[in-house]
């Protein structure tokens, strides 16, 4: 199995769109009327918010000889050699007034100059407001926004397996392209690329060149940012992945405010539940001494059922929630202890706050 991360240096990237609600214009009509089913009205509505991104950047040459001081001295080679690279990807306009564009972090890695081109052919200079590699999300800003059309946010938590999806992007540099499919799975983790994973999986045809694209539901709402495919042969085999928009929005909010994501912790180690018949929750393996979790009364063996009234289905999901909650905020937990439901409130503290020496503790 080969996992391809789309839109890397030298490739062309586009956008991914998902469908889950049905606007009147996109409903399948009664065939008795002679009208032909079509998603064209929906496509016309959302595609102006999909943009192409061109990046000029510099990367360090990774030749082992350049790390040899004798080689550098003999050939008068600088300590760090860099080469210029060009890359292309895609993005989604999410705020037309501020000129904000969401894309994949790896599309704009090492960027020195960014150009954003809209569907109608206009070109704008852009800047990288901030990027977060652990979630593969970046926020760009068009320097002088004018006449832009943004797309509204959907609710990725409302997605269900089987919801229809369309993909809009720029695969292989062909230009804006539309495909369709289904939401194949939710909550995919363990792909090994990024630190905070909760991917939407789709079989809508996406290919190299789609990174940074939009996953849009049938109501025209943005529900994900396209990031990767599984591709043994380099092309589409019906397994693509997108970052849920609810996760991307939390990253975007921090990037827009400070230009970076500051992750915190509450001082617990978690594990998934494995008891037969268990459907959700994360078990506390260890509580760090002196941590916010200990001060809130959490104990080893507690099962976290909800966080801020949101159901927790796995240890990974809880880790994501803590990692994307701004430092200083509080999280309300619903826990089960000895078959009794209790509540606790914990504060998110900085990652660099003193942790216990045990390597097993302090994962969240």
Image (cartoon, grey):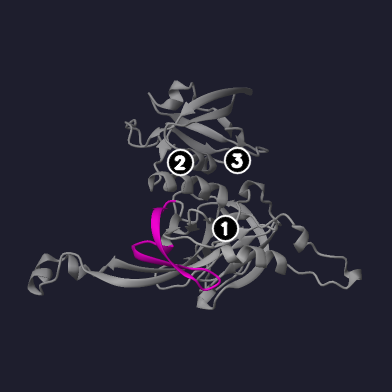
Inter-mark Cα distance, 1 to 2:
28 Å
Relative to 135, 354 lies left or right:
left
Give the CA separation, mark 2 to mark 3.
16 Å
Query: What numbered label is drawn on residue 313?
Result: 3
Residue at x-position 44% and y-position 50%: 195
Residue 135 x/y as whole percent: 46, 52
Marks 1/3 in contact by CB < 8 Å: the verdict is no
- Classed neighbour count for the residue bearing mark 3: other residues with Cα under 10 Å, few (<14), some (14–19), many (≥20): some
Residue 338 in view in this figure: no
Residue lying furthest bottom in this view? Answer: 174
Disc nearer the start of the sequence (1/2):
1
> Horizontal placement of 36 versus 158: left or right?
right
Verify CB contact (< 8 Å) between mark 2 and mark 3.
no
Which residue is labeled 2 in the image? 323
Q: Main secondary structure of the magenta part?
A: strand
Residue 271, above or below 243 = above
SS under mark 1: loop
Q: Is residue 126 magenta?
A: yes
**What segment carries the magenta color?**
107-134
**Residue 150, disc:** 1
Residue 90 % position (x, y): 50, 66
The quadrant in which residue 328 appears is: top left
């Amino acid at each position: 199995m080969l996992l391809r991360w789309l839109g890397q240096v030298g490739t062309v990237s586009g956008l991914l769109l998902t469908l889950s609600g049905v606007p009147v214009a996109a409903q399948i009509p009664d065939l008795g009327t002679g009208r032909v089913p079509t998603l064209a009205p929906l496509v016309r509505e959302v595609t102006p918010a999909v943009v192409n991104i061109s990046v000029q950047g510099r990367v360090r040459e990774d030749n082992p000889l350049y790390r040899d001081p004798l080689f550098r001295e003999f050939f008068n080679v600088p300590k760090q050699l860099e080469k210029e690279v060009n890359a292309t990807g895609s993005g989604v306009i999410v705020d037309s007034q501020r000129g904000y564009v969401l894309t994949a972090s790896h599309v704009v890695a090492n960027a020195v100059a960014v150009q954003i081109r809209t569907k109608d052919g206009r070109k704008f200079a852009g800047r990288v407001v901030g990027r977060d590699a652990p979630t593969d999300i970046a926020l760009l800003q068009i320097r002088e926004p004018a006449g832009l059309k943004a797309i509204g946010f959907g609710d990725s938590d409302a997605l269900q397996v089987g919801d229809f999806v369309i993909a809009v992007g720029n695969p292989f540099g062909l230009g804006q392209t539309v495909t369709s499919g289904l939401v194949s799975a939710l909550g995919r983790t363990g792909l090994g690329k990024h630190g905070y994973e909760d991917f939407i999986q789709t079989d809508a045809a996406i290919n190299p060149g789609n990174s940074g694209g939009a996953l849009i539901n049938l109501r025209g709402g943005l529900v994900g940012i396209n990031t990767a495919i599984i591709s043994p042969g380099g092309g589409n085999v019906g397994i693509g992945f997108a970052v849920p928009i609810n996760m991307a929005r939390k990253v975007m909010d921090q990037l827009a405010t400070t230009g970076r994501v500051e992750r915190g912790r509450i001082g617990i180690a978690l594990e998934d539940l494995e008891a037969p018949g268990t459907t959700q929750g994360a078990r506390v393996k260890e509580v760090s001494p002196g941590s916010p979790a200990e001060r809130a009364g959490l104990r080893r063996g507690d099962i976290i059922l909800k966080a801020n009234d949101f159901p927790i289905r796995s240890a990974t999901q809880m880790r994501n929630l803590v990692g994307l909650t701004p430092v200083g905020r509080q999280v309300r937990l619903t826990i089960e202890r000895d078959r009794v439901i209790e509540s606790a409130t914990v504060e998110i503290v900085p990652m660099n706050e003193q942790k216990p020496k045990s390597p097993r503790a302090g994962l969240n």
